[in-house]
Image (tube, rainbow, N blue to C red):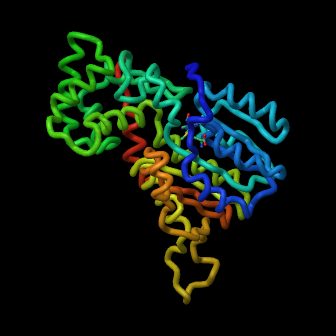
Amino acid sequence: MNATINLEQHFPVLLKELVSIISPLYGGTFIDCTFGAGGYSKRILENKSNKIVALDRDNSVNDIAAKFKSNYKKRFEFYNRKFSEIGEIKKKDIKAIIFDLGYSLNQISNLNRGLSFKSKGKLDMRMGLNDFSCDEVISNMSQQNLFKIFKYFGDEKYAKPISKEIIKLRKNKKIKTENLVEIIENIKTKKSGKNNSTKVFQALRIFVNKEITELINGLINAYNILPVGGLIAVVTFHSIEDKIVKFFFKEYSEVKNSSRYLPQSILSKKYFNLIIKKPIIPSSNEIKINPPSRSAKLRFAYKSNNGCDFKNFVNNFNYLINIENLKFNV
Ligand SMILES: C[S@@+](CC[C@H](N)C(=O)[O-])C[C@H]1O[C@@H](n2cnc3c(N)ncnc32)[C@H](O)[C@@H]1O
């Protein structure tokens, strides 16, 4: 994974909006869980009273991180780790923890990584620090499990015929990216607004990178290391991610069973202060300059109490976690 990253090419999504939310907290440590091309980190470090602790699972960003280190010295630290492991990075005085989910333009446009349906050759799709590649999934997963992945992670109407065709074709040859695109094109003959392969590729990327488990554990561990008063901000790119983040903040920002006749001690606590319930979305101007930003949504909340167990949160999305844990024969 040695993609060269061109910082000039990258447009950090919803940057102005994010800065207007976090700037009142300036003067302390900010955790950038998804360093990427460093767009968010760079802007936050422009204020000299800020420090950044950055994470990224993709080691192709190491070169950018090294440049940041030589520019910002002690104000910048980088870890090539997954954000689900954020609990192991203990820092004092954390002001905010930021997630900008999904893929950078540099990752998607590097066709050797096979993240995009425009790639040719081996189906890879690994973002970094993975247990297996997409090729292993397509070569070994049962038809029933492929069906579940396409249906639940891609909302693909044609999940059944596509999964059946994969099993048929793989008996005779290794399925490469272009073969998978061909299978999908042959089955989905009607054109829609999106490319016919978008949903299946999204589903496989989620599965290969365990994106749901990453997000759920990342959010819980972010809450656990954040002091009361600190902020969690998340930019999502597809509806499953947004559903998870929306539930996480909403479920724990409302006081349940509240009755004014009950003593305060019996009322369940509120763990987040959610100031804006609706997500913030990019302006038409941003979408014009950077069209992929059109699906971005920014949600944020302040931690208001310690001690949340997140049982309902995990239970609510267990059906998705179970799909990410499906096994295949190797
Ligand atoms: C959309 S880009 C972030 C762009 C960044 N905000 C900027 O302004 O340059 C997402 C980055 O998050 C990383 N990433 C995605 N999931 C991750 C995870 N679970 N743990 C750590 N990094 C992750 C990807 O490798 C990618 O570099």
Question: Which residue is painted at 45% across and 19% down in the image?
Answer: 112
When asked about the image quadrant of residue 217, the answer is: top right
Q: How many marks?
A: 0
Left/right placement of residue 251 relative to residue 39 reads: left
Give above or below for 19 relative to 115: below
Left/right placement of residue 138 relative to residue 312 reads: left
Inspect this view and state whether residue 140 appears. Answer: no
Question: Which residue is painted at 44% across and 23% down in the image?
Answer: 111
Q: Quarter holding the N terminus?
A: top right
Give above or below for 230 relative to 35: below
Q: Quadrant of ligand 1?
A: top right
Question: Which residue is painted at 35% across and 41% down in the image?
Answer: 153
Using the image as rendered, state which of residue 144 and residue 174 is in the foreground: 174
Using the image as rendered, state which of residue 158 and residue 309 is in the foreground: 158
Give residue 229's position: percent from left, percent from top. 71, 64
Q: Quarter holding the C terminus?
A: top left
Give above or below for 70 relative to 306: above
Name the outermost residue toward the top: 172
When asked about the image quadrant of residue 36, the answer is: top right
Give residue 308's position: percent from left, percent from top. 60, 60
Using the image as rendered, state which of residue 101 and residue 40 is in the foreground: 40
Inspect this view and state whether residue 6 appears. Answer: yes
Question: Which residue is painted at 61% across and 56% down in the image?
Answer: 16
Give residue 243's position: percent from left, percent from top. 42, 55
Give residue 43's position: percent from left, percent from top. 70, 48
